[in-house]
Structure formats: C-alpha cells, structure tokens
Image (cartoon, coloured by chain):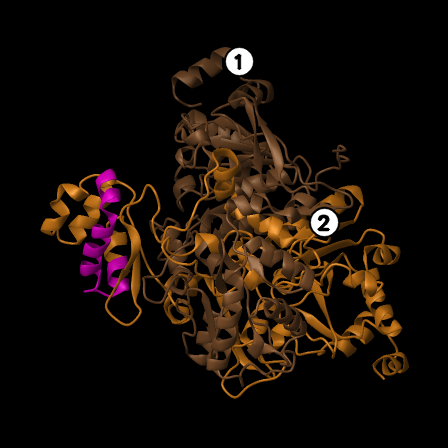
Amino acid sequence: MAKRKEKPAMLDRYRVLDLTDDRGAFCGKIMAELGADVIKVERPGGDPSRNIGPFFHDIPDPEKSLSWFAFNQNKRGITLNIETKDGQEIFKQLARKADFIIESSKPGYLDKLGLGYSELSKINPKIVMTSITPYGQTGPYSTFNSPDLITMSMAGYTFICGDSDRPPVRFSSDQSYLQSSLQATVGTLIAHYYRELSGEGQHVDVSMQESMIWTLCYAPHDWYLLRQILHTREGSFWRRLGVTYRLIWPCKDGYVCYRLLMAQPGAEVMNDLIASMNKEGLGENMKGISWTTLSFTEVPQEQINEWEAEIGKYFLLHTKRELHEEAVRQKNVIQPVNDAKDLYESPQLAARDFWVQIRHPELRTSITYPGPYFKSTETMWQKGHRAPFIGEHNDEIYEKELGFTVEQLAILKKENVI
Amino acid sequence: MKTKYALEGLKVVDFSWVFTGPIVTKYLGDHGAEVIKIESATRPDGTRLMTPFRPGAMGLNASGVFANFNSSKYSININLREPRGKEVVKKLVERADIVLETFGPGVMTKLKLDYDELKQVKSDIIMLSMTMVGQYGPHSQQPSFGQVLQATNGFVQLLGWPDRPPSLPVAAYTDFIAPWYVLIALMAALDFRRRTGKGQYIDLAMLEASVHLAAPVVMDYTVNGRIQNRMGNRNPGYAPHGVYPCKGEERWVAIAVAADKEWQALCNVMGNPDWTKSPKFDTMLHRTENQEELDRLMGKWTINFTPEEIMSRLQAAGVAAGVLQNGEDLVDKDPQLKLRQHFVEMDHPEMGKHLTERPPFRLSQTPSEPQRPFPSFGEHTEYVCKEILKMGDAEFAELIG
C-alpha cells in the first residue's frame, strides 16, 4: 500500500496534564489524537485503571491492560505523588507551563491539596481545567459513590434498556465514562476557543449523569409534554403511539436490525425485498402494496405482525452478511448486528483504512486499534505511539524539562514522590 | 477581547437535520454562535414532525424533541434547487466560519454547494459532512438511520441477556455519540484556522467515531481473538452488581459492590441477616460464583423499600447505589439536576412551554444556556435576508415570490 501523505494535526502541541483515572482517560486520548502533547500524571506504582481488563494474552499485568492501551494511546507518562509537598510543588511547576489540565477525582480532593482550579488559576490565569465527575462539583449527589451502572441508572438510561420480563440492564461495557469524556473534550475546546480570544482560562465542570441524559432523546420531553412514561424495556421491539415494530430479527447466523418501511421516502425498496422473498416462495401476501403511501397508524397491528412473520422466515434462510449485502444493492436499511469480529472484517471500514497498527516492541508485536474517524483535506488524525509505561517519561520531563539533578530525583524516588 | 458568551461572533450555516447535526449547532448556539438553519418548504427538518407533541398540538412547531435540539437558532426557508436560493446560501457562506451538512454522500455536489464550490466563496471556510459510514466506501450509498446503524457498530450486541436476543436502545445510541465528535472536530479545526489561516473539509463517519466507545471490546478480539457478548448486569470485579425490584410499580434500584469493605457496609444496612454470613458470600470470588442466588436474596430485601430509601441509606454508608430514574424523576424530582439547572423551561409563541437541555458541562466564566427558543419553520427568512444580508424590500419580495 502506498504511504499515505502526512498532514499536520488539527491541534498544536498544546501541553495537557492528564490526572484522570479510567473515568476521564478518554478525554486526554482524544486531545492526543488531535495533536496535543498529553502527559499522563500517575501516582507512583501506576494508576489503578491499569488493572482493568481485558489484558494482552489474558495476562493480568499493569503494563498489559488493553483498556489502558486504548484510552492512553499517544500520551507520555510520568509518576507523581501529589499528596506530598514536593509533589505539589512539582505539579505547580508543570501547571505553570500547561495549557490544559484534565482530572476526574472526587470533588474537593484537589482543593484540599491546594491544587484546585482556584489555586492553579492564580499561577496560570490562562489555564483551562476540566473536571469530570459523576454528578458535577457541587450538589447533594456530588459525593456519591457512582460507578458506571449507578450513573447510567441515575441518568435514566438503564430504565429503558432490556427485556420487559426481566430487570433493566446496562451496556456490558462502561459507557458513562466515555460519553462524559467526549462531552468534556467539547467543553474544553469551547473554553480554549474563548481563551484564545480573551486571554482568560476557565474551569469546565462536567457531569456524567447529564452526559448520559443527552443520549435519552425522548424520556424527559415525553414526561414534560404528556405526563407519561412512554418507554420502558422493549427488548427487540420499538413501541410508540400504539404501534409495535420488530427491530431485531434472528437470521441464519445471528441477528439483523431492520424496520419495516412504510409511509416514508424510500419505502418503495420494500418491493425489491419482496421480489427476493418471492423467489424463495415467501411474501406472496405482500405483493402489490403501495408501501410509500401506507399510513402506518392506520395499518392494524395484526397486519404488521403478519408481514413481519413472513419477512422473518426469509431472514432465517440467510446470513447477516448476505442480508446486508443484498440491502446495500437494493438500497434497503437492513444492518447486521455486528460483534467485534464482524466489525474487524467490515469491508466499509477496510475501504477507509480505519484500522491502525501500533507497535508494542516490548511485547514483540503490533496491535490493531480503532483509527481515524474523519478524513480532512488539510489535517490528519494522529496515530502516535503506544500508551506509556509507568513513569516512562520521568527523565524526559523531570530531568530535561524541569532540570532536576540525578541526585534530586533519587531523593524524590526514595520519598515515593515520583 | 472579553465577550459574554464563549462563541460570540462565530457564524454557522447549518444544512443539517434530524438529530446529530442539529444537536451540534444547538451546542454552538447555546454558547453564543450565530446559527442559521437552512430549511425548505419541500423538506423541513424531519424532527419537526417527531413525537412527543402536547395533547391536541401538531404541526411543524410543536415537537418536544425538535424544541430541545434547536434552541438558539434562526430558521430560513430557502429552496436550494432554485438559483436564487443558492445565491442566498452563498452570501451566507461568504460571511460564515462553519458549514455543517448531514445529507447522504453526493447530495451537496448535486446541489452545486459542495466544498469545491463553497471555498470559492469563502476560501478559509470549515465545512464538515457527517454521514453514517463516510463519503466513500462500498456501503456509503446504503440508506440508513441511527436506529439500525447502532447494530452495525457493535453496541446492540452488547446490550441484554446472554441467553436472549439483544435488546435495542430506545433512541439510536450512535446518534448521541457522533455530535460530540463533530463538535470536537469543528472546535479543533477553528484552532487550526486561527494558527494557519487555513480552512478545511472534514468527512466524518458516525460508524468510525462510535467504534472508539467499544475499543476494549474490539481489541479483546484483535489481540486475544475473543468475541465479547452481552452479559446482563454482570461486571467482573463487582458482586453484587445488579438492578433490584423495589416497592411500587416499575421501581428499581441499582447496587454495585466493589470491595469487601463495601460488602460489609451493605450487610450492615441490610441488618446483617443470616444468609449474609454464609461462606457463599464471604469473599469477592465467592460472591461472584454465587451471583444468581445473591441477586435473588438481595431482591427479597430491596422489595420492602422505595429505591430512594435504599439509595440514601446505602450511599450514606459508602455503598454505590442509585435509583433507576425515569422521565418524571429526572424532570420533576432529581435535586442534583435542579441545582445544576439541566432542564431549562422556555416559552415558544406557538408551542408554549417546553424544555430544552443544557450541555452537561458548566464553564466558570461563560454561560452554556439557550439564547432563544427553537425557531418556527422559516421564522427568520426575512430577518436573515434583510437584517443580516442587507437585502432591499424589492429584492426580498422577488426572492420569496
């Protein structure tokens, strides 16, 4: 393959101090892939989020966590104990020259150490400091113990997920930390835009609960306007305004996602699907229907069920890949319910060179990571390098940049400061 | 220069519709940017027709979802297929910083309003096209919408019970990932332009962006060959970790216990019943092995209380617990959201009172808040043409004639 032409990053080499654990690491990663110089500041011994699986070849090891790799890619790393006086002094030195600080500790923790926004903005009035917490910096819930399941529930998300005959469920992969890290990056860059115009920094106070509320779409507005809870747990179906559609359909090797198209532009492709079904002796009862002009509130539910049953028989005869490829040709909306392997094998992602290889020389291998989510005429998403080892860049930062002597560093090491 | 709002002076021409794009421009508008929403009588933003509507109300200016996603914007009604319509658009682009569009690939080229055309009008324009899977590639011409796309990127596979078909999020989950990526790309592109003087065209794919939120799951496959599946409410490293029934109809509480210390605190709050002393539950590993029985026993305790009672008692003891809040809880009851004023009640001349939501972050120096309620369809056509583009009466009459 021809080497892609290198283009610059969107962001300059802005210095970001990243104090986060797993709840905010994604924010710094996004800044890093846009070109910022992100320094992960870990406690001596390493951040506890290094112990979160899955692990490289299933070997639990703080230098082998795949979620650590994924969310700390392209950062540099130093160790620093900010609970010591020396550590606080060093952190202030770093903050003086930094453009951004991102943190996800309990509200009030950094203030107690003299490293809160009110202190740091005195040292560096242009600093943009972003705090990512479950409920925000103040308020009755701000001190709550709230891992992903709890935040998802308090945001109203868990209530609407799952099967009606079992308790509600959450995604089997933490989402509130990632959603709020994305929102935090938005707020951070808006504050940055303002700083460049005004010369004034800001504190960005992000709530994970509110971040997840932004993914609900309907629930608050259904309640406010109708005084109704329209959605509970609908499993494979979509229920609204008295109509129920199937959305998840079993097929030969898994599931596809699809909704009967009626009364909308594009619904004429129903006829192509029915023609395919006819070839296999199915869908005789669906011929000659004007799908674009049908008003779906007037079609009785039994009729919808009957059509869906016929389509369901057709889907069971084919794989998700076959059904998707036929839908691409027919301009229909069928999508496969993909797992990680399907995603990795997606021809669409391959055609856009989505997957990237990052070298891990110490593991004697390269690892495939998710890659650029945009293409630009002028700039490029930055692949960069693997996540840092514990304290990997201590020398670079403490010795070369801050000018500590080897003797001083030995003392700091012995005192468990770095 | 200090301004009241962070993005004051920023100008946005917005061709986007439905959810993702409008959420992006709402965020920009709520921080003070001028957002001009381009609609046409043949193709108003489809979200205007989306439920919920207040009982008895219908029409283009009454949707609760549209109202939320479109605060702080101007709406103009312009036919993009007419040469005069295109002229108006180009005049708007000439004075703009950002153009956003979310049509299918190729639509802007057919309209002769693609990046090559628009950069002739404004050489440093930042234009972003957001699509489901990107501007090119074998699936780029397949029509799609978020409700089915969320299956493609792997999220549906990860929601529900391992012995059952997957569940589907009620609202298309990927529609609520892409907006933040679009905003990040736009804000970063503005920084690039400030430093280099260069605009750019950005092709952003919802599918690609959303895969990043499943990165560890994907890398477990690319590295270890493992295909992760949905696991109900299980979460390694926590036990109990689940959703339990409470007093009342459809009332539930979530509880997540990470360490022995938290388990002891939970047992104390439950009054240390005999079953908690069983060796089946004395360590994290034992609790994990016996999680089904543990869930059943927990449920027998939780059913005697409201979720609010359990949450406050457990949180006071340091145990992670939270109510499964519904729309009513969020809007009318949650004191945290009230304090942070997440929901803002606004009044629209036609729709009346409705809610719009604030972005989930608060900036210490500049407000994040709706400037005005959503625009009625085409409400600002005259204002934009006459006040912003300085058209004369005759020219304007000719345009809308």
Q: CA distance from mark 2 to mark 1?
A: 41 Å
Q: Is residue A172 visible?
A: yes
Secondary structure beneath dot 1 equals: loop
Labels 2 and 1 positioned on one and the same chain: no
State the orange chain.
B
Write down the chain letter for disc 1: A
Tell which of A271 and B141 is nearer to you.
Answer: A271
Q: Position of residue A288 (x, y in %)?
A: 64, 81
Tell which of A82 and A247 is nearer to you.
Answer: A247
Q: Residue at x 77, y 35 (%)?
A: A5
Q: Quadrant of the C terminus of chain A?
A: top left
> Magenta span has B287?
yes
Write down the chain letter for disc 2: B
State the brown chain.
A
Q: Which residue is mark 1?
A: A405
Q: Which residue is mark 2?
A: B190
- Main SS of the magenta segment? helix
Q: Residue at x 72, y 49 (%)?
A: B190
Which span of residues is magenta-colored? B285-311
How many circles with numbers are drawn on the protein? 2
